[in-house]
Image: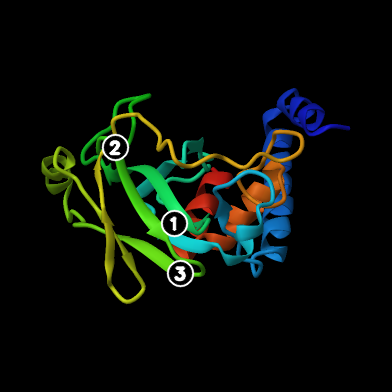
Amino acid sequence: MTTFQVLSFIKSRPVAVKQVARWALAGLFLATLAGCSSNAARVETWQGSPAAATNAATLETPGAIKVSQVNGRNMTNFLMDDLALDYALLPGENEVVFINKTIWAKSGVVENGESKVHVIKSDPQVVRFTVEPGTVYRFRYDQPKTRSEAESMREDFSATVITDDGKVVAESSVWEGRPAADRTPVLSNDGNAGAVSGGGALDTLKAVWATASEEEKKAFLRWAFE
């Protein structure tokens, strides 16, 4: 029986059966993820199996930085907001497109069907820098403490990319929608590639679980058992 058939069967059952089945499926899913939580994974930003991948660098991104493209290749959108991810970058010139996205709880009564949070996004930003083999990079930027600060900072948002020792290697600018022309994506033999090593949706979820913080895992558990 396929996953779709299982979900269709559960949907057709009475409410009590649906609740039990949802708990069982969530438990099975989490048990699978927990079994591989020690195998940390990075999101690969290339296609195929280039030789330079053995010396890939790492770009650490906090939950508020959402990477949409690397070298013209769209990155996967993951299930959870505020999820910190590591991106593997090939040595050489790289171009990373991203936004800053913060989420703030609404105060007071929320109407039926209304979102319970305020979502504040910056305009798309881009950084271009030369990646050194095996180096760890991270974003540095001003982080708002309140929603009003986030709204006032949105228009002029910018970030820098720094190395582990604090050296600045790039400063972001507004993305104008033109990918870098000097980076040619490496295609696999069949022209396809997965965003995370291992390919399928379950492998992607496992990789995300492995990199999630304790708070992010708790937030997922709350969602799963609602």
Name the residue nearer the viewer: 21 or 72: 72
Residue 53, image x and y in percent?
61, 59
Where does residue 112 sit, x and y in percent of width and height? 35, 24
Q: Nearer the viewer, mark 1 or mark 3?
A: 3
Label 1 sits on a secondary structure element that is: loop
Residue 119, numbered label: 2
In the rendered structure, which disc, 1 or 3, sits on the residue that comes first in sequence? 1
The residue that label 1 is drawn on is 84
| Image quarter (top left, top right, bottom left or bottom right) of the C terminus | top right
Residue 10 position in % (x across, y down): 75, 30
Which amino acid type is shown beneath numbered disc 2? Val
Q: Which corner quadrant of the image does residue 111 belong to?
A: top left
Q: Name the residue under label 3.
A: 135
Residue 225 seen in render: no
Q: How far apart are marks 2 and 3 (CA)?
A: 33 Å
Gap in angstroms between the C-alphas marked 1 and 3:
18 Å
Tell me which amino acid carries mark 3: Thr
Q: Is residue 132 visible?
A: yes
**At which x and y percent is residue 17?**
74, 35
How crowded is the residue under tag 2: few (<14 C-alpha within 10 Å), some, or many (20+)? some
Please tell me how crowded label 3 is: few (under 14), some (14-19), or many (20+) other residues with Cα within 10 Å.
Answer: some
Circle 2 sits in a helix, a strand or a loop, which is it?
Answer: strand
| Mark 1 surroundings within 10 Å by alpha-carbon count, few (fewer than 14), some (14 through 19), many (20 or more) | some
- Distance, label 1 to label 2, CA atoms, is 17 Å
Mark 2 and mark 3 lie on one chain; the one further toward the N terminus is: 2
Residue 58 lies, with reference to residue 117, above or below; the image says below
Q: Which residue lies furthest to the right in this view?
A: 1
Indicate the amino acid at tag 1.
Ala
The nearer-to-camera label among 2 and 3 is 3
